[in-house]
Image (cartoon, rainbow, N blue to C red):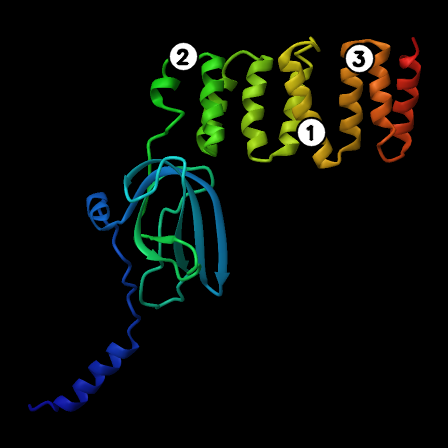
Amino acid sequence: MRIALAPLLLVACVLLIAAPAIRAEVPNRSVESMRESASVVVTGTVSSIHVSKVGRSESRIYTIRVASVQKGDAKPGDHVLVSTWHTTQLPGAVGSNGHRGTPALGATITVYAGAEKSRSAPATSVHTVILPNGFQPAPPIFATPELLNSSPTIEQLDEAAGKAAAAEAWQECETLVRAGAKLAPSPDRSLLLLRSLAGQNRLADVLREGEAALKIEKDVRSKSFGMLWLAAYSSAHDLNDKQALIRLLRLRAQAEGTPAAWGNVLHTLEFLPDGPEVREAIAEAKKNARP
């Protein structure tokens, strides 16, 4: 029996057209391949992320604070700008979704990027991260296994956290803080914690931890008391938390225990917005400020 070929060919064409398109995602590239083709390879920390969205597409510009340079003209301490993009594809769409494994704020990473400037900021030297995995996790710079596995003292952790905070390596700073939290409670441990919280602008957490630490540290003449009190008071001021300001002013005056201290509290309270709690605190300060 002879079979007509034309109808079969027509059916085959219809099936091909109707079949759902298969997404051709870009496979990950090897580190060796990316290093060879990149014009910029740096290790550092993510100090800022600028996100812009148009429809289903999202572009990001990362500011990388450079710790070391493997390729390119950057120097340690410089800030390098790199860009990524990502698209949420419609079902059946063909093509890459964009970059994968993009880092969070404060992460320690190695980035492999090209020489061309990003179209999103043509007037600025913004290098495009190599697709799709040009961001790679990097070993910690400050919270190293050698430090954490050596039973570090609070002083060692504090020194490392200070360097991490200065480099805006907040994830490493948090690691050091968690290590410090395993040690016995102390004002120094609280100061280590506050360094990370304040650097991340987590003011409510700074206020809470600062007040808790001041209950342990009673010596108003100590350096730790002054630093703890200032951190908590500044956070309460920035949060416009009037009740916390009153609590901290009263705590300091009680710790000093002198009429002069209550006089200073009285002077500060008079600048706070009026209210029942303020009037009550002013009356207490006036009473205790008398010689």
Foreground residue among 268 and 88: 268
- Chain-order first, disc 1 or disc 2: 2
Q: Element at badge 1?
A: helix
Residue at 44 percent of width and 53 percent of height? 60
Is there CB contact under 8 Å for labels 2 and 3? no
Which percent across, then down, holds residue 195? 55, 26
- Chain-order first, disc 3 or disc 1: 1
Please identify the quarter of the rendering in which residue 266 is found.
top right
Which percent across, then down, holds residue 275? 89, 34
Give the residue type at disc 2.
Ser
Is there CB contact under 8 Å for labels 1 and 2? no
Residue at 60 percent of width and 14 percent of height? 187
Give the residue type at disc 1.
Ser
Residue highlighted by disc 1: 234
User: Left or right: where does residue 102 sit relative to residue 207?
Assistant: left
Q: Element at badge 2?
A: loop
User: Left or right: where does residue 233 sit relative to residue 64?
Assistant: right
Residue highlighted by disc 3: 254
Q: How many marks?
A: 3
Question: Label 3 vs label 1: CA separation?
Answer: 19 Å
- Chain-order first, disc 2 or disc 3: 2
Which percent across, then down, holds residue 93? 35, 68
Foreground residue among 214 and 285: 285
Foreground residue among 261 and 242: 261
Please identify the quarter of the rendering in which residue 145 is found.
top left
Q: Which mark is residue 151?
A: 2
Residue at 50 percent of width and 13 percent of height? 183
Q: Element at badge 3?
A: helix
Residue at 78 percent of width and 21 percent of height? 249
